[in-house]
Amino acid sequence: MSSSLKNRIKKIQRHLGVRADGIIGPVTLSKIEQAIGLPQDDYNLRVSLQGLKALVKFEVTSKANYERNLTKAVWPGGKSGATVGIGYDLGYASKRKIENDWKGLVSDHTLGRLLQAAGKTGARAKKEVSRMKRSSMKVPYLAAMRVFVKSTLPKYARLTRKAYPGVEELPPDAQTMLLSLIYNRGSSMANKSSRREMRAIRALVKNQDLDGIADQFIAMKRLWKNKGLSGILKRRDKEASLIRKARHRYKDSDIVLL
C-alpha cells in the first residue's frame, strides 16, 4: 500500500472517530457502513473490540504465531476439511462461498488452492493440505481477520442469539464472550451432563445475571480438568472475567456489529 493511500485511510478514520492506523479492519468497515447508510438493523450482536481481540487470541494465540504457523493450511483431523485463516474449514464451504469470502484478499494463486480444497474432508482433505503446504500459497493475517469478522462470526452470532434469547440486551463484552463460547462449543442444548452449564446460562441471560453467567463458565471447567488442556481452562477463566467486568457504556468506535 502506498503511503499516500494509507494517509487517506487515516484521514477517513479520524473523521469516523476510530483509531487512525491506516488499516481497513472490522471496526473501520462497520463505521463506513454506518456512515454511508447501509442497513444496520440486521445484526445480531454488538461485539466489543476488547472481546473480539480476546476471541482471536483464543484461536490463534498471536499475530506472530499466525504468521509463523498458520498462513498456509492445517488439517485438524477426523472429518475436518483443510482449514485456513481463523478456523475457516474449506471442506464445508462451496466454491462460490470461498470465492465470495476470499477473492481480492488473497492472491489468485492462493485462491485457486483454496478452491481446490472445497468440499474435501477427512483423508482427502489431509492429502490436499500436504499439497497446499508445498505450494507458495499464503493467507495473510489481515485477510484472515477480515473473513473471520465479516463471514465466519456473523453465522455464530445468529446461533448465539438463538441459543441465548436476550443476549443482545447484555453489555457488549458479555455478548462477545457468549459468542466465544458458542464458537468454541457449538449451540447444542442437548440433555446431557456435558451441556449442563450451557443450558443453565439461558435463564441467567434472561435475568441479565452477569455473575451467574460467569459462574457457569467456571463450573464447566470440570469437563477439561486434569486432561492436559490448560488452554481451554484459561479461556474459560478469561471469558468469565470479561463477563463479570462487562459494562454497557462503550464508544461506538469500540463496537463491531455482527
Image (cartoon, rainbow, N blue to C red):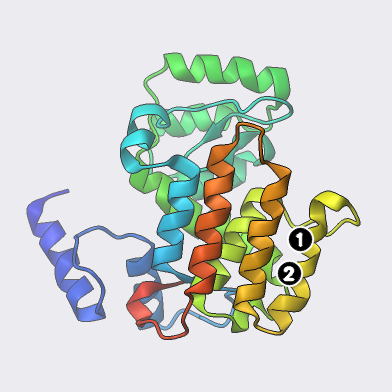
Taking the image as drawn, is residue 46 in sight?
no
Residue at 65% from the left image edge and 83% from the top image edge: 208
For disc 1, the neighbor class at 10 Å (few under 14, some 14 to 19, many from 20) is some
Q: Quadrant of residue 54?
A: bottom left
Which secondary structure, mark 2?
Answer: helix
Numbered disc total = 2
Q: Residue furthest front?
A: 226
Q: Are marks 2 and 1 in contact (CB under 8 Å)?
A: yes
Residue 64 is left or right of residue 54, and the answer is left
Residue at 52% from the left image edge and 43% from the top image edge: 99
Q: Work out whether residue 142 or residue 56 is closer to the camera in this orientation and state it.
A: 56
Pointer 2: what residue? 201
> Looking at the rendered structure, which numbered label has been put on residue 177?
none
Which amino acid does the dot numbered 1 rest on?
A: Glu
Residue 90 is left or right of residue 34, and the answer is right
For disc 2, the neighbor class at 10 Å (few under 14, some 14 to 19, many from 20) is many
Q: Quadrant of residue 77?
A: top right
Q: Work out whether residue 56 or residue 126 is closer to the camera in this orientation and state it.
A: 56
Q: Work out whether residue 93 or residue 211 is closer to the camera in this orientation and state it.
A: 211
The spot of residue 101 in percent (x, y) is 51, 49
Which amino acid does the dot numbered 2 rest on?
A: Ile
The spot of residue 145 in percent (x, y) is 41, 50
Pointer 1: what residue? 197
Which secondary structure, mark 1?
Answer: helix
Q: Work out whether residue 157 or residue 237 is closer to the camera in this orientation and state it.
A: 237
Taking the image as drawn, is residue 252 in sight?
yes
Residue at 70% from the left image edge and 54% from the top image edge: 220
Compute the Cα span from label 2 to label 1. Answer: 6 Å
Residue 199 is left or right of residue 101, and the answer is right
Q: Residue furthest right?
A: 191
The spot of residue 13 in percent (x, y) is 22, 72
The spot of residue 222 in percent (x, y) is 71, 48
